[in-house]
Amino acid sequence: ELWLGNNLHNRRTERGTFFPPFWKMDSHYSLVEFSTELNLAEQETITICAEGRYNVKLDGKFYPGMPDNVLLPAGKHSLNIKVFCLDRVPALYVQGKTVATGPQWKATFEDKEWIDASGRTSGKSGTIYRHAGSWNFDTPSALPSAYKLPVSPMAAVSMEPKGIGMLVDFGKETMGFPLFQGVEGKGWIRIYYGESAEEAADTLHCETTDRIQVTASVAKLQVNDSKAYRYLYIETDGGVTFKQISMLYEFAPVTERGSFRCSDTLLNRIWDVSDYTLHLTTREFFIDGIKRDRWVWSGDAYQSYLMNYYLFFDAPTVERTIQLLRGKDPVTSHINTIMDYTFYWFLSLSDYYLYTGDKTFIEQLYPRMESMMQFVLSRRNSRGLLEGLPGDWVFIDWTDKEMSKQGEVSFEQLLYCRSLETMAECAGLVGKPADQARYEALAASVKHILLNEFWDQSRQAFVHNKVNGQSDGVVTRYTNMFAIFFNYLTDKQKEAVKTHVILNDSIMKISTPYMRFYELEAMCTMGETDYVLNEMRHYWGGMLKAGATSFWEKYNPEETGVQHLAMYQRPYGKSLCHAWGASPVYLLGKYFLGVKPVAPGYSKFEIRPELGDLNWLKGSVPTPNGQIKVYANARTIKVSASEGEGYLYFKAAKKPKASTGMIEKMASGDYRLLVKGDGREIVVTR
């Protein structure tokens, strides 16, 4: 994960200049020893392939050189192969008649801890949990270092002369390799990339460029690095010509397993473009945007995980991203240098376990959860709270107006509290009751201060921050809306926040899809479905009306024209394909199809379809090994599940009927029906 992530993080360029990330990057382990125990009925020859230099040792005795083939005698033996590789990940492939690399092998990076297939490690420090990786090295020719995302050909939809060059349109935001055919002459091809036509044509200010020197006529000429664009503006000199321009579209081979359709065609378009946005930002890892930054940011990734659970349910990409973000010990800074991004990393592990039920991954990560949390705890102030220290970036959100990040920011305390609760939960999972009790006590202490010192009774909301123990009374949306779906507030307080903060136009508005995600989730949890649907139509529909083919990093409805393209004091600095723009996938799946796990891995689930102002809706939500399907209109609900067991909750004006099962009455107008994961469709008429 680290090696692959370092390669990804260092692909970014700005106007042809290498642009690496600005946080500490950890390297892969360059020396790894692999070991297995054998019991052979007869002698056999094994073939050995490795990435790196290696030695082979059988029962403590070395074979000379680096043998490609080794004859193993019959009987019981210990086989050890040590691999060194500095520029790539040390990797090993062994194949014989009965002997092959696989889950029975252990590994160590010479810290004297042997890792087995489950991640359990026994050594000088007792039993801990880690794991050795395997992914794409299942034949001698499939080298991990050679892994690349697949590509497919894509034609341009139009080409037209513009100025001294040619403007090429691929019809929608995309990512891949420009491909020239029939190139003749000697000279230069200059390529200016644009997520908009304005950006591509602005040769002085567009964010991404390439210069290719042509020294001889060639049938095909491909740009070396994939880029994000919809438009290309191409200039040539020295008599260079080409007959055709197309591209190789680069994509992650994930399978789309979730779906959504409803009676509103605009919402269907919003779902489709959200779907496409997440496809584009799903690479080897979940990245933020395909033009910039093309990096793995924890806050962006956290939302991608949640959207992924309702579209792909691709757990390996989640795991790789979580591993990459955490890196190696010792911890010397917050993840991505951002305090809140460290906390999103903790929260992602709780969600991962709930959706996947994969306890082994939590066991593997727990030691690094502990060391990450110890870093956080070492930076507390005298009150046990957190303030930004030198080197910390307190981000929260991009805003149109300046927002204080000084002192004890209530939003950071809230995420910190939730992270401590996650630590307690995971400590319980891995069988560490003392840790669980300690983290529960720390969380309770922080929560007490948050609820009693940052809640302003007169404003019926949390204040934004305190500096030297004093608040200026400023209220922002962030702490307040998170506290709703974290369930930190009473029902009365939630209603107060809804009225005094979320529906209060005098409170600084949110202009990024990043935080609109959470604002609308808070309203979803309070049953404000009509409000949420209308906000989607206005906000995401507004981007569509402005010409979006993927959803943006930031959107201000009051801006027009090229104003939509600017950010960071640069005319085309805004990313027009940003992962956090795809949140309708999550909101529509979880709160309108109404499907969510209530026990790990969907062993227990609930279905609460919400029509809002829609005439009908339908869709499917992926589960670890199947899916849950939902259809609903005013009179009929149809559901089926292929694993687990859960309840369908719904309202009815009169006693409803079901095609199978017994409907239970919960309260006036509220009913539920048990749904078993046998794949059978249940029809409810109300």
Image (spheres, rainbow, N blue to C red):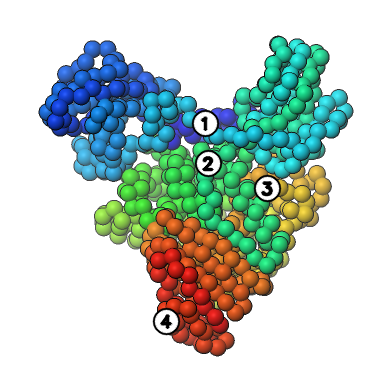
**Alpha carbons under labels 1 and 3: distance apart:** 24 Å
**Alpha carbons under labels 4 and 1: distance apart:** 52 Å
Position above or below: 201 against 72: below
**Alpha carbons under labels 4 and 2: distance apart:** 42 Å
* Type of the residue with mark 1: Lys
* Type of the residue with mark 2: Pro
Q: Residue at x 54, y 50 (%)?
A: 256
Residue at mark 2: 253
Residue 506's label in the rendered image is: none
Q: Determine contact: label 4, label 3, CB under 8 Å.
A: no
* Disc with the residue nearer the chain's start (1 vs 3): 1
Position above or below: 646 against 96: below
Query: Which is more foreground, mark 4 or mark 3?
Result: 4
Q: Quadrant of residue 227?
A: top right
Residue 670 drawn at (x, y percent): 50, 82
Residue 193 falls left or right of residue 495: right
**Alpha carbons under labels 2 and 1: distance apart:** 11 Å
Residue at mark 4: 662
Residue 200 drawn at (x, y percent): 77, 34
Q: Determine contact: label 4, label 1, CB under 8 Å.
A: no
Residue at mark 1: 148
Q: Quadrant of residue 517?
A: bottom right
* Type of the residue with mark 3: Ser
Residue 550's label in the rendered image is: 3
Q: Secondary structure at mark 1?
A: loop
* Disc with the residue nearer the chain's start (2 vs 1): 1
Query: Which is more foreground, mark 4 or mark 1?
Result: 4
Q: Residue at x 61, y 74 (%)?
A: 633
* Type of the residue with mark 4: Met
